[in-house]
Amino acid sequence: MQLPSNIEDLFTQNFNGFRSVRVRTATEAVVVENELNRQSKSFQTKITRSKKHGREFVILLVSTEAEAVDAA
């Protein structure tokens, strides 16, 4: 999985009020999680299952610098 230079560009969806990205495989999820860890970003991973889409990994961006500036 090719990651953009700014990892936050992947987070185009919304899940439970948080910016998120959905990936299909555990390998892709680990790649994104490792990059988020390397950039010291807070995140949470959820595994969803449905008959239509099967198993998906939803990675939620818990906090960003932009949210911290808005809160201040």
Image (spheres, rainbow, N blue to C red):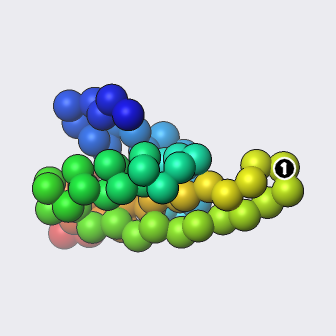
In this figure, what is the number of numbered marks?
Answer: 1
Residue drawn at x 66%, y 65% is: 48
Q: Is the residue 50 above or below the residue 5 in the image? A: below
Q: Tell me residue 45's x, y (percent).
A: 46, 67
Residue drawn at x 19%, y 69% is: 72
Q: Is the residue 30 above or below the residue 17 in the image? A: above
Q: In the displayed structure, does residue 19 sit left or right of residue 48?
A: left
Q: Tell me residue 67's x, y (percent).
A: 29, 60
Q: Furthest residue to the right?
A: 51
Q: Tell me residue 13's x, y (percent).
A: 54, 46
Q: Is residue 20 visible?
A: no
Q: In the displayed structure, does residue 13 sit left or right of residue 61?
A: right
Q: Tell me residue 24's x, y (percent).
A: 58, 47
Q: In the displayed structure, does residue 4 sit left or right of residue 39?
A: right
Q: Is residue 44 visible?
A: yes
Observer-nearest residue: 35 or 66?
35
Observer-nearest residue: 72 or 34?
34
Q: Furthest residue to the front?
A: 27
Q: Secondary structure at mark 1?
A: loop
Q: Amino acid at mark 1?
A: Lys
Residue drawn at x 53%, y 49% is: 25
| Label 1 Cα neighbours within 10 Å, binned few <14 / some 14-19 / many ≥20 | few
- Give the quadrant of residue 39: bottom left
Which quadrant would the N terminus be assigned to in this image? top left
Residue drawn at x 44%, y 61% is: 60
- Give the quadrant of residue 65: bottom left
Question: Residue under circle 1?
Answer: 52
